[in-house]
Amino acid sequence: MLNCEYVGNLHVHSYYSDGTGSINQIAQAARDASIDFVGINDHHTLGAKQDGLEGWHEDVLILVGMENNHKHNHYISYAVELVVPDNTEHPQEVIDAVNDQGGIGFLAHPFEKGSRFVFGGHAYTWEDWQVTGFTGISIWNYSSQWRDGISNIPIALWQAYVAPHRAITGPCPLALAKLDQLAQQRKVVAIGASDAHAVNVQYGPFKRCISPYEFLFRTVNTHILLDGELEQKLVLDKDRIYTALGNGQCFVAFDYYRSARGFRFWAEKGRELANMGEERSYEPGWWLKAVLPFEGRISLIRNGEKLFQDYGKELNYRVQKSGAYRVEVTMRNKCMTKPWIFSNYIYFR
Ligand SMILES: [Zn+2]
Ligand SMILES: [Zn+2]
């Protein structure tokens, strides 16, 4: 069992591109939000790494990847040492360039819809579905969802000033459906991200930082699971985190109402275990198990179809067929149902 859990916020922009925060400010925001690591993905640059800012900032690990492309086909990558050239028209070239460096990468916000009040309504969608070789998809991009929900100025003001978390409805259904389809053919990884920019905007007399880093670091996080603790050694630690992300030893959680720390999903057959991201040959005798830190409504999904759901703190299910299995959890908060936890896959082929 993988029992060491680290909570990270991925896809964060700093002032090395169009974010407003320095790396030190971002590390402080992560500390204030009680998360363990941050993945920086500035546009077209590894500037923060080149300036020596990747690494442990006291108890927060700052990792530096990048984000590629312009009008469409945004791709976020990690574990790259050299700047990957943009290629918006041929994103396969970007994916291949990341893989050639031994990196991992994710389609950043493939199905965002955009809002007519932001960027002239442009949506930075993924257009080329012939691509192969990407590690996975960011199923939940907080900033895309927030922006997609702005249908008029009062809603924009309400979301900006009163209740930014209320814009959140859960992972993008199209992204999840795409992953479920891919998972039936190959291993693929779901991550969640903030796409934080901490932009300062002004509407008439109202000036405000929209979605500050610390707030976003309490929202859509990716929790990774390791077999031992990190050691405050950058090279070793980032390799372990990237290996976990690349393998799908992670889950996506909306930590705003309740932290999902403590969630686990695994399979067991006698003394044999399979963690998220692992593949096994199907044979009778396997059980899928999950535990939650608090009660929630747990749904078990096989090949994109909901098998069953139950309310409680545990899941026990005897596997009866091959398939790509994952878990979704919702929780109750003040009489409202909220999205909470979205696991990666365990595969029985
Ligand atoms: Zn983007
Ligand atoms: Zn971005």
Image (cartoon, rainbow, N blue to C red):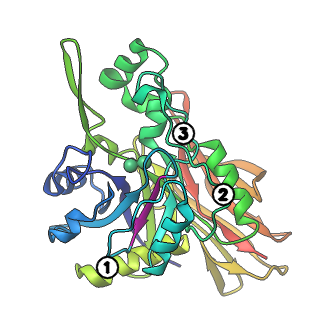
The response on whether ligand 1 sits within 8 Å of label 2 is no
- Label 2: few (<14), some or many (≥20) within 10 Å? many
* Nearer the camera: disc 3 or disc 1: 3
Q: Does the magenta stretch include residue 75?
A: yes
Nearer to me, 22 or 252: 22
How far across and down, in percent of the image, does residue 302 sit? 76, 59
Kindly identify which numbered label has been placed on residue 179: 2
The residue labelled by disc 1 is 237
Q: Is residue 283 magenta?
A: no
Residue 311 appears in the picture as rendered: yes
The answer to whether residue 228 is above or below residue 295 is below
The Cα–Cα distance between marks 3 and 2, rounded to whole angstroms, is 16 Å
How far across and down, in percent of the image, does residue 337 sit? 57, 33
How far across and down, in percent of the image, does residue 32 sit? 21, 50
Prevailing secondary structure of the magenta residues: strand
Kindly identify which numbered label has been placed on residue 112: 3
Which portion, as a residue range, is magenta?
74-78
The response on whether ligand 2 sits within 8 Å of label 1 is no
Q: In this view, does 274 lie to the left or right of 249?
A: right
The answer to whether residue 263 is above or below residue 341 is below
**Residues at marks 3 and 2 touching, judged by CB atoms closer than 8 Å:** no
Q: Is residue 10 left or right of residue 60?
A: right
* Amino acid type indicated by mark 1: Asp
Residue extending farthest bottom: 271
The Cα–Cα distance between marks 1 and 2, rounded to whole angstroms, is 28 Å
The Cα–Cα distance between marks 3 and 1, rounded to whole angstroms, is 32 Å
Kindly identify which numbered label has been placed on residue 106: none
Residue 55 appears in the picture as rendered: no
